[in-house]
């Protein structure tokens, strides 16, 4: 049976898509050897197929871009959520580990001399932590010590850890006096040894270095603001200064989150590291937010 051109042309689209059996393909190819019209028809079909595929790819590109932007936004949202959670957890941990300083009494700390030279400090059940500072003296006349004790919600409720006992002069140092100091500004109390002050009054002051760091950060913000104004027309330099300028701003915000309006503290080192941690998290949040708004602008364009 002779196969007409119409039959061949009906099969050519399937031939182009490689959807025919081997016998049908051979039939078409035999016909094409002797039929210029069908060859031309095949060529046109191939070109149309290529154009359709190209158009489909072109039409899909905007959708691919939108999909990538949505994925990027979703990732940025996840990162921001994680960082905000990290700030919250840091603040919560800071609150739970904030020391509540205890008054000096026999229930909180007692001093006991053992082995004629060793001094044993026995802390009560409410004491979770303590600080002992050697404030003066020498081995010949004896050293002067200051100590305080505290409890925290974290150690009391969660870890259930107690301070226990400690030997003050484990290496045999001579102890002249031991004072107990309070965080409320009241006078230090002599709990062992010789009274060194004529009026019997001395006060251990809180550390103030956090206030100095805050002032430095504020000065850097002012300097950065001046530089931003001076180089506002130089885009690349302006951007670099801006990213550096964000650091002291994050430090100031972190400082107020931890300290509030009071910059004096008896646990300044602990608070300083908490401030640094929150500062870095806030800085990362800021960078992520900037990246997010960059993506928004690209979407608008």
Image (cartoon, grey):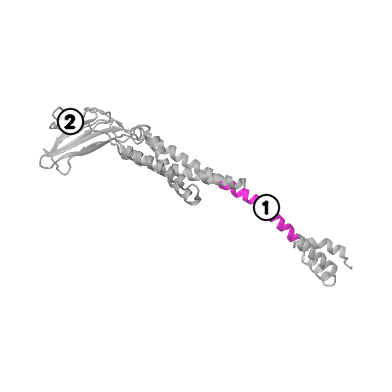
Q: Which residue is mark 2?
A: 191
Q: Which residues are magenta?
A: 49-72
- Dominant secondary structure of the magenta stretch? helix
Identity of the residue drawn at 45% across and 46% down? 230
* Crowd class of label 2 (few under 14; some 14 to 19; many from 20; radius 10 Å): some
Q: Which residue is mark 1?
A: 60
Q: Position of residue 129 (x, y in %)?
A: 28, 36
Q: Position of residue 5 (x, y in %)?
A: 87, 65
Looking at the image, is mark 2 or mark 1 earlier in the sequence?
1
Numbered disc 1: secondary structure: helix
Identity of the residue drawn at 40% across and 36% down? 91
Q: Please give left or right for residue 293 compared with residue 103 in the image.
A: right
Is 267 part of what is drawn in magenta? no
Residue at mark 2 to residue at mark 1: CA–CA distance: 81 Å
Numbered disc 2: secondary structure: strand
Is 70 part of what is drawn in magenta? yes
């Amino acid at each position: 049976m002779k196969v007409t051109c119409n039959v061949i042309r009906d099969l050519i689209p399937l031939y182009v898509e490689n959807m025919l059996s081997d016998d049908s393909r051979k039939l078409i190819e035999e016909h094409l050897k002797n039929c210029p019209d069908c060859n031309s028809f095949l060529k046109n079909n191939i070109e149309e197929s290529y154009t359709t595929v190209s158009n489909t790819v072109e039409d899909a590109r905007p959708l691919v871009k939108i999909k990538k932007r949505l994925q990027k936004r979703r990732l940025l949202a996840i990162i921001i959520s994680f960082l905000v959670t990290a700030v919250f957890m840091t603040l919560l941990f800071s609150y739970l580990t904030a020391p509540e300083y205890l008054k000096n009494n026999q229930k909180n700390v007692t001093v006991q001399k053992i082995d004629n030279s060793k001094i044993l400090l026995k802390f009560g059940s409410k004491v979770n932590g303590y600080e002992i500072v050697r404030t003066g003296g020498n081995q010949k006349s004896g050293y002067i010590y200051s100590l305080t004790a505290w409890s925290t919600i974290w150690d009391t409720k969660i870890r259930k850890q107690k301070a226990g006992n400690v030997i003050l002069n484990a290496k045999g140092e001579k102890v002249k006096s031991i004072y107990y100091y309070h965080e409320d500004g009241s006078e230090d109390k002599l709990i062992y040894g010789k009274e060194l002050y004529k009026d019997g009054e001395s006060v251990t002051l809180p550390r103030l270095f956090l206030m100095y760091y805050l002032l430095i950060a504020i000065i850097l913000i002012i300097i950065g603001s001046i530089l931003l104004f001076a180089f506002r027309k130089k885009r690349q330099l302006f951007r670099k200064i801006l990213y550096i300028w964000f650091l002291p701003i994050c430090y100031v915000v972190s400082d107020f989150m931890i300290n509030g309006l009071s910059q004096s503290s008896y646990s300044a080192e602990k608070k300083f590291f908490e401030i640094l941690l929150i500062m870095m998290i806030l800085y990362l949040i800021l960078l992520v937010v900037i990246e997010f708004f960059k993506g928004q602008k690209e979407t608008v364009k």
